[in-house]
Image: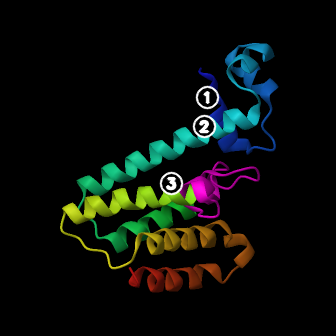
Amino acid sequence: MKIKEAASKMFMQQGFKEFRIQRLTKQVGISLGGFYTFYEDKEALYEEILRDEKNRIRKKILTIIAGENQAPKDFFADIAHVLLDKTATNKFYTNEYSSLLETLVWNDDPITAEDNLHFIKQIRKIWENKGIVIAASDEELAAAVATLAILCTHKEKIGVGFDSWYPIIEKSLLAQL
């Protein structure tokens, strides 16, 4: 089993804080020194896996949009529901160190915000080529996705009212697109 494949599964199940390099090296059959030949530390490994996963997900999203005739509002609603499911079952999406969700949708640092806007522009171009016009700006689309993601990642903090309020908020937000 490859280092990144094994580490990815371990990060998904255990999260960053509980991940141990020693367990990984034992599982893949390499020495601790062998690990450090490829990666400076667990943070470097984690960041590389996040980048790979983000690129995989974005490529899949672009392929889906290009191949289906789904309306943008339905697409963004589906993405929000997938995020809601993933944040509940996969520690990669909501990690205490740095999460996949942060790299996919948060706009709180200039590099990530620019990367997210570039991705939104790719999505918009596919829809425009299909004759679908979206009234919202790229920045508004990025903010809408980030807003839904924030709600999804804080479901437990919001409490029992989440299940009744989320569909209302989602519908209202997506109506603005």
For the C terminus, give its image quadrant. Answer: bottom left
**Which tag is nearer the camera, tag 2 or tag 3?**
3
Q: Is residue 101 visible?
A: no
**Is disc 1 surrounded by few (<14), some (14 to 19) or many (20+) residues within 10 Å?**
some
Q: Nearer the viewer, residue 40 or 149?
A: 40
State left or right for residue 132 relative to residue 55. left
- For residue 91, above or below residue 38: below
Point out which mark residue 4 bears.
1
- For residue 116, above or below residue 91: below
Amino acid at pointer 2: Ile
x and y percent of residue 111 in the render? 58, 54
Residue at left offset 50%, top offset 54%: 115
Circle 3 residue: 115
**Is disc 3 surrounded by few (<14), some (14 to 19) or many (20+) residues within 10 Å?**
some
Q: Quadrant of residue 123?
A: bottom left
**Is disc 2 surrounded by few (<14), some (14 to 19) or many (20+) residues within 10 Å?**
some
Q: Is residue 74 visible?
A: yes
Residue at left offset 42%, top offset 56%: 119
**Stretch of the chain drawn in magenta:** 86-111
For the N terminus, give its image quadrant. Answer: top right
State left or right for residue 70 relative to residue 33. left
Q: Nearer the viewer, residue 112 or 147?
A: 112
